[in-house]
Amino acid sequence: MQRTIMVLLAVLSVAPTSADSLLILDDAEGKVGPWRDTEIVAEPVHGGEGALRWEVAKAPTLDSPRFLGDWTKFDELRFWAYLNKAYDYNIPIVFPAEGGYYIIDWKLDWSGWKEQRIKLADCRKAHEPAGWDRISSIGFRAQGYGQGPAPEGLTIVFDDFALHAPGDLPETSLEAWLARERKERVTQLKAQGNP
């Protein structure tokens, strides 16, 4: 009996497991497109040669470049963020989709670089968003969502935005992902016929 358990444990330990995958959305070095009211800086940087600096009090709304994609295979938005000090302040993160958006509060309670892992399942619906298969961008909202004014001097530096999937992905670059999305959308429209 004990030998059977040992053999079973040995087999289970070498059994293949599905890999986690990351789809890089933006390495914050300007390749994807502009994030309005930000600038690319050389310091501090988490990875690569640049990072994205947002002076929150000067521009309390930040939006990623627009892209349309199916996020249903993903469970987390991941990125690195740098604060010069911890703040007692929340910034809502929104994920717009036609008809509404998904929203989650992001607490700024650390200093230095920290990896952020935003669980998409924890987001709340606002209005009637079309679904996680129709996300058009990522937004950060430092005013207008019930919080007080942004603390004076609050600046956030971002780096390495990615979507995490608990399994394998057919593509790992944003360009390949968007190309597949567009091809599938065109095929779908052609199948519906021309109105």
Image (spheres, rainbow, N blue to C red):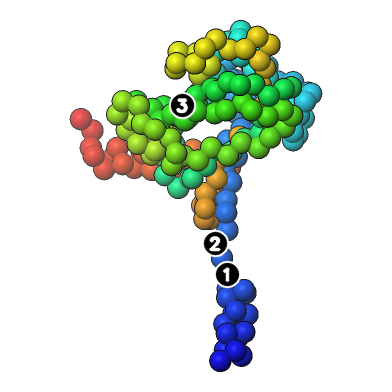
Residue 154, given in percent of the width and then of the height, sits at 66, 15
Marker disc for residue 18 = 2
Of the two numbered discs 1 and 3 in the rendering, the one whose residue sits closer to the viewer: 3
Residue marked by disc 3: 94
Q: CA distance from mark 1 to mark 3?
A: 36 Å
Label 1, residues with CA under 10 Å away: few <14, some 14-19, many ≥20: few
Camera-side residue of 71 and 122: 122
Relative to 96, is 19 above or below? Answer: below
> Which quadrant is home to the C terminus?
top left
Residue 40, given in percent of the width and then of the height, sits at 70, 20
> Which quadrant is home to the N terminus?
bottom right
Q: Is residue 86 left or right of residue 137?
A: right
Residue marked by disc 1: 16
Rendering quarter of residue 111: top right
Q: Secondary structure at mark 1?
A: loop
Q: Residue at x 39, y 38 (%)?
A: 132
Relative to 111, is 16 above or below? Answer: below
